[in-house]
Image (cartoon, rainbow, N blue to C red):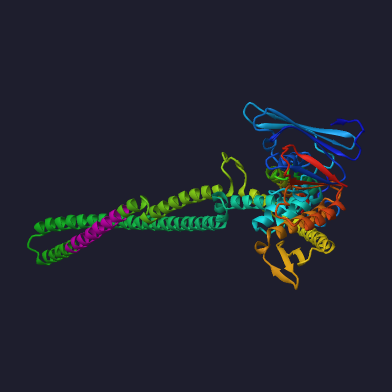
Amino acid sequence: MRNMPADTPGNIILELENIGCLRRLRLEFKPGINIIKAPNASGKTTIVRSFSSMFSDKIPPSHILALDELKGRIRVYYGEKIYEKVFRRTPSGHVIVQGDMLPFADPRAFDACVALAETGIVHRITGGNVIFRKYLENLSYGNYYSALIEASQELVNEYGRKLASPSFRNFEILPLLLTELTDLHMRRDEIRQKIENSKKNHEDKLRKIKLKITEKNSALSQEKVLLSQLYRDLSFEKERERSLQELLSMAGESSKIVSSIKISIASSQDRQTRLKKEIKTRRCLLKELRREVEELREKLRREEKGPLEIKGLEEKLEKVNKMIILKEEEIQRAERFPPDDAEYPGKLIVDVRSEILRKIEWLEMVMGYFQEKYMRCMTSARRRFNENVTRAFHELNLGGFENVFLDQDFSLQVMREGNIRQPIETLSASEKLTISLVLMLAAKETFLPDFPLFIVDELTLSYDPERFWRLMEYVKRRVPYLIVTSLSSSLSDTPKVIHKP
Amino acid sequence: MPSIRDAGSPSIPYIKELEKVALKILKENPDYKERLKEILEEYASRYSREYNIRT
């Protein structure tokens, strides 16, 4: 951008060099209506597009530079300054652009102030698309809020997907795992108690066996003593009998003595018989006692090896201990991310989950806030836009239309006289063009009231000239510079500007 | 660091600050959604981090 000689105040000069099909061109636009006249394929649309690229970035640089050129230039003299853009084709074929935009540049201007076949409203209406939500979003900056809502929603969805991942799903079964662990601990306590009881019973049993063995041993000892006494008694009786027998052999014939000795011998023998019987009985008893003692000792030996019941319980205890270890490992996995986790290494899942839920909570509040802003913005944009459309139709007095407006769904409604709704696709080409231009002008007045240009590219082909010029006069009263391209029947192929103040 | 709750936003922490930053990004490039998501994530993380301090 640089200063220019102040010899053309109020005029805009457009210079093109190697732009589209134009090698070199200079056009001057004055306040009022400027008609660019040229025959077909002489560069009228190229002029509109290249001029648009000085205030909007909607047209890609590759669509502007001449296809067979490496360098091109657009220069605009506006106010007292020169604004220039240089286009260069790189060896790889890309087109890069450097330079200045006009001071009133606005990316929205292309959709509101340039009526090309491809621009927003014209394209929509001729294509039968009557939903203008996106169009108004872009012009009213409602798209900023919808972008924020969309980005927030995407983040919420991403967090939702994270929470549905296996790690977080495992976390959800954590209460169940903890309950199972508690059950296992209870089972372990029960088994331990049983083992303890069993051991106690076993000790009691051993003690009782030992006590019985002691008692039996004691009885055995007594029996032995008794038996020994019986043997001594028997031995004594035998000795006595022998003595009596000797005495009998020495007693001679005295019947009285013999008889008495014989009675004594008989008594001794009788006693011996009784003693032997007693000894026999005692020996049997002793044998029985010994057998019982032996049996008790055997039982003691068996019992001392430990009862089978405890072994079974100890095996159960070992199994439960192993299950507890496995369950604790499972709980640990459900509680914490693994140390090699890419996103949350070693972190507690409950903490990460809470963190994500808080993020979602905040994002949902943000979405609600921007949703409200979006609604306010769009409602206001629609109301102001409709007001300007209605005013334009009334002022232009085009006839045939009762009203044209965007309804609550941002769908364009065309009402014929008598308030009869007419589908867009049934309108004639000139009516579609009229509505397109009125809507664009309303958009410009609503959203870009200070933008100084309004450009209409060769949309007059199917237009009633009287109605077209009425419309252009209406635009001229609202926009400093109106530029219209028009087909010329002249043989000269150089575009020329005809000015109508 | 600015206060958790911005003046004029009764219930949403950092909303005014976020709105200012986000609109600046969108004015530079309306299609800069990834950058927008980064900013939103930063603020969401900040909210989450400071949540315990507040409660």
Camera sees residue B1: no
Q: Is residue A278 magenta?
A: yes
Range drawn in magenta: A273-297
Q: Nearer the viewer, residue A38 or A416?
A: A38
Please say if A253 is above or below A363.
below
Q: Is residue A253 left or right of residue B36?
A: left
> Would you identify the image quadrant in which residue B10 lies?
bottom right
Q: Is residue A279 left or right of residue A370?
A: left
Q: Is residue B1 left or right of residue A21?
A: right
Q: Is residue A330 magenta?
A: no
Q: Position of residue A392 (x, y in %)?
A: 82, 60
Q: Nearer the viewer, residue A324 or A495?
A: A495
Q: Nearer the viewer, residue A148 or A496?
A: A496
Q: Is residue A304 left or right of residue A406?
A: left
Please say if B42 is above or below A443.
above
Q: Residue at x 12, y 55 (%)?
A: A246
Magenta segment, prevailing SS (helix, strand or loop):
helix
Q: Position of residue A182 (x, y in %)?
A: 54, 57
Camera sees residue A43: yes
In the rendered image, the residue lying farthest to the top is A91
Q: Residue at x 21, y 56 (%)?
A: A236
Q: For the image shown, how many numbered marks are present on the structure?
A: 0
Q: Quadrant of the N terminus of chain A?
A: top right
In the rendered image, the residue lying farthest to the left is A253
Q: Position of residue A38 (x, y in %)?
A: 74, 42
Q: Position of residue A222 (x, y in %)?
A: 32, 57
